[in-house]
Amino acid sequence: MSVEQLPGVEEIAQVPAALRVVAGPEWEDGNGHVNVAHFYGLHMRAAEAALQRIGVDDDYRTSRRLGVFSMEQHLRFLHEVHIGEELSAHVRWLDRGDKVFHGISVVVNRTTGQIANTLEVLEGHVDLVARRATPFPADIADRIDEAVAAHRGLSRQLPLSGAIGVRR
């Protein structure tokens, strides 16, 4: 993916930030920039916020005994981030199958105005008792479908890995 193919930060911001943070000194690695583990954690926190917005939260896991497991991920680094720079994470819903959804989290460096990295995911919906994939309940499926439709309508889509997606 070339930088020219990327949407601008203003286009990414069409999806409100799931969270905003400043890269703290504990995030720095031996190369003088933010370490991959902290980016991954930021993406996971953003994904959790997006899941909570559609109703997949602690209550959902406890009362329905259902949850979401990661099945496949693709992390892409585009620009360095240094300590003290402000970051935001934005989650786009891309597609949904009966038991899976495809999404992408985008970390924007607000200080430099660049997309720092993306994490594309395929997540499976799981029965937490049987520990097996199971279809989304209708209410959750409808909320995911609404988010997918809204995000497909954005001005420009993100280039994807091509390796991850909902199989039909």
Image: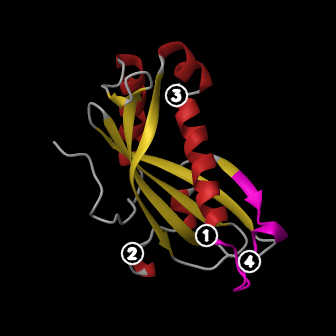
Kind of residue indicated by mark 4 = His
Calculate the distance from the C-alpha at mark 2 to the C-alpha at mark 1. Answer: 23 Å
Calculate the distance from the C-alpha at mark 4 to the C-alpha at mark 2. Answer: 24 Å
Return the disc, 2 or 1, that comes first in the chain's sequence: 2
Kind of residue indicated by mark 2 = Gln
Q: Where is mark 2, residue-wise?
A: 5
Return the disc, 4 or 1, that comes first in the chain's sequence: 1
Label 2 environment density (alpha carbons within 10 Å; few <14, some 14–19, many ≥20): few
Query: Could you tell me which secondary element the residue under label 2 belongs to?
Result: helix
Kind of residue indicated by mark 3 = Val
- Dots 2 and 3: beta carbons under 8 Å? no
Question: Outermost residue, front direction?
Answer: 130
Kind of residue indicated by mark 1 = Val
Q: Where is mark 1, residue-wise?
A: 36
Query: Could you tell me which secondary element the residue under label 1 belongs to?
Result: helix
Camera-side residue of 80 and 26: 26
Calculate the distance from the C-alpha at mark 3 to the C-alpha at mark 4. Answer: 33 Å
Calculate the distance from the C-alpha at mark 3 to the C-alpha at mark 1. Answer: 26 Å
Q: Which residue is rendered at x = 42% and y = 51% of the image? A: 154
Q: Where is mark 4, residue-wise?
A: 82
Query: Could you tell me which secondary element the residue under label 3 belongs to?
Result: loop
Q: Where is mark 3, residue-wise?
A: 56
Q: Which residues are magenta?
A: 20-36
Return the disc, 3 or 1, that comes first in the chain's sequence: 1
Q: Which residue is rendered at x = 48% and y = 60% of the image? A: 119
Question: Outermost residue, bottom direction?
Answer: 31
